[in-house]
Structure formats: structure tokens, C-alpha cells
Amino acid sequence: MSLEDLMAATKIQKRYLLAIEQGNYDIIPGKFYVRAFIKQYAEAVGLNPEQLFEEFRKDVPSTYNDEVSDKLSNIKPQRELPKPASKVLELLPTILIIGGILVVIAIIYVIVQAVNHDSGQKNNQAAPQQSESKYEVSEDSSLAKDQKKKDKASSDDQEKSSEKDDSSKDSSKDDEDVSLKATDTEGSTTTYEVSGAEEMELTISASQASWLRVRDESGKVLKMGELKDGESFKTDLTDLSQVDIRLGNATGIDIKVNDETLKYELDPKNTMTQNIVIVNKGKEKSS
């Protein structure tokens, strides 16, 4: 990874990154920032910052906790409230509870009055409404039955058509099996060829935090930065002839094309930082 890549991933100035690599901590503003910058640097390249601090305890400034304790000691304690004010604060919860109870009682009273008023009006109108409703139901019962039959028939037709569409989609997906195989390995770079489907989607998922950069055949950056644990990145490969993937921590990255999982030709435990080149053979043939 270049210093430009690290600067884009960590948002730390290039001269500070260079100072960390050379052990020149004097130009970094404060020992607190030395440890903070080293921690961001380590996470960007897939290393454990706490393990680094423990291993290089003599070289890295160790006054982080001291600075925090000094900052906390400068905070002035709050002045105690006078006794009358403190008594008011002690009684405040009780006052709020009593006020809340009174509000609830008032709301219940209003609701009860409204319900009693509505029930009185309904009793006065109940007899004529019941006779009219019986007449309407007897008159429209045959029409209602016919309408229910028609609705049921149309819903059955829709369910059958949707089942046919789902089955056709499933069969088309089964026919488009993707082939993803390694064709060449040179240093930390492995080339894979993918073919077998008209539409292809690239999915990169992280089970551990890792720095990531994805570029197309023209060099355009599709994704660059840290991919945190549980995050994923997707892009359409259908119209791309090639993508170049740079991984900072390959042990925590899974790569898929559609449902086909890329099998690392180089063991990520031995080669954490890898370059993955995926060539779309279907795009090459069509072009």
C-alpha cells in the first residue's frame, strides 16, 4: 500500500504517516496523537494496535493515560446547591408524580363523559336502524354472494400466474451457473476468469476489518477505504471486462460472483495483502 492509499483510508496527513514509519514522533503534535495515529495506521493495514503497543512499549510514547488523567484533574467540581434549592430538587419527583396522577384522572373523567353521551344517542337510534339494516341485507345477499365468487376466482388466477412466474425465474437462475477459476498467480497477484451467466454481480463481505480498493478496467475507483466487520460492497460485473481488487487483510474478506465463492489461490494466512484480478470472459466475447 502506498502512502497515498493510507492517507485516503485513515485521513492522516502524509508527513505524519511518514514520521510514524521512521519513528520520528517529534513532528507529531503531542504524544496523545502519536498513539492515536499509530492505532489508525495499524487498523488500516489489518494489524492489532494493542499488540503493537505492547510489543514496542519502549519505542512508542507511554504517557497516554497520564495525559487523560491530567485533563480530568483540570475539571473543576461543581458547586453544591444551597440547602433550599436541594430540598426543592428532592421534592420535585413527588410533585411530578402527583401532577401526573391528576392529569390521568382528568383524562379518564372526560372519556367517561364522552362515552355516556355517545351511548345515549345510539340507544335512541337503535330501533329504526336495525329494521333498515335487515331489509338491506336480505335484498343484497344474492349480489354479495356472486361478488365473493368472482373475487375468489380472480385471486386464484393471480396465485397460479405468480407461481408460474416464480418457477420460470428459478429455472432461469439454475441455468446460469457461474464458473470462477484461477488462471495465473504472480507474486501476491492472482488472476481469476469468470463466465457462465449473462448477468453477474460482485459481492465483497468482511468478517474482519480490512482496507479495500476496487477499480475497473479503465482505472476508475469503484470503492476505496476500510470495510468494517459485517459490512459488504456490491457492484455489477455484467458490463465490465475486468476488476482489480486490493485487499489489506485477506483473512477477513469473502468474495462472491453471484452465488459462486472465490477460493483464494494464495493462503490468506501467509499472504494477508493480496491483489485479485477478475476477468469477465463473457464481456470479452460479446465485445
Image (tube, rainbow, N blue to C red):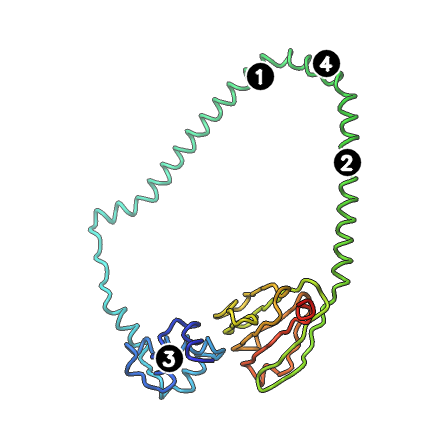
Amino acid type, mark 2 = Ser
| Residue density around tag 3, few if under 14, some if 14–19, many if 20 or more, within 10 Å | many
Instruction: Return the x and y of residue 68 as percentages of the image width and height.
Output: 30, 72
Report the residue at 33% width, 40% height from top.
95
- For the residue pair 40 and 51, the one nearer the viewer reads as 40
In the rendering, at what x and y percent does residue 54 appear? 42, 84
Q: Looking at the picture, how far across and down is residue 116, in whole percent?
A: 51, 20
- Counting residues from the N terminus, which is met first, the one under dot 2 or under dot 4? 4
The residue that disc 4 covers is: 135
Query: Closer to us: mark 3 or mark 1?
Result: 3
Task: Give the mark toward the camera: 4 or 1.
Answer: 4
Residue named by callout 2: 154
| Secondary structure of the residue carrying numbered label 2 | helix
Identify residue type, mark 4.
Answer: Tyr
- Report which quarter residue 272 is drawn in: bottom right
What residue do we see at 24% from left, 65% from top? 75
Regarding mark 1 in the picture, which secondary structure is present there? helix
Answer with mark 4 or mark 1, whichever residue precedes in sequence.
1
Quick one: label 1 or label 2, which is nearer the N terminus? 1
Q: Residue at point 59% right, 77% down?
A: 276
Give the residue number, with chain letter if any, for mark 1: 122
* Residue type (three-letter) at the residue carrying disc 1: Lys
Give the mark nearest the N terminus, 3 or 1.
3
Write down the residue under mark 3. 17
Q: CA distance from mark 3 to mark 2?
A: 68 Å
Q: Amino acid at mark 3?
A: Leu
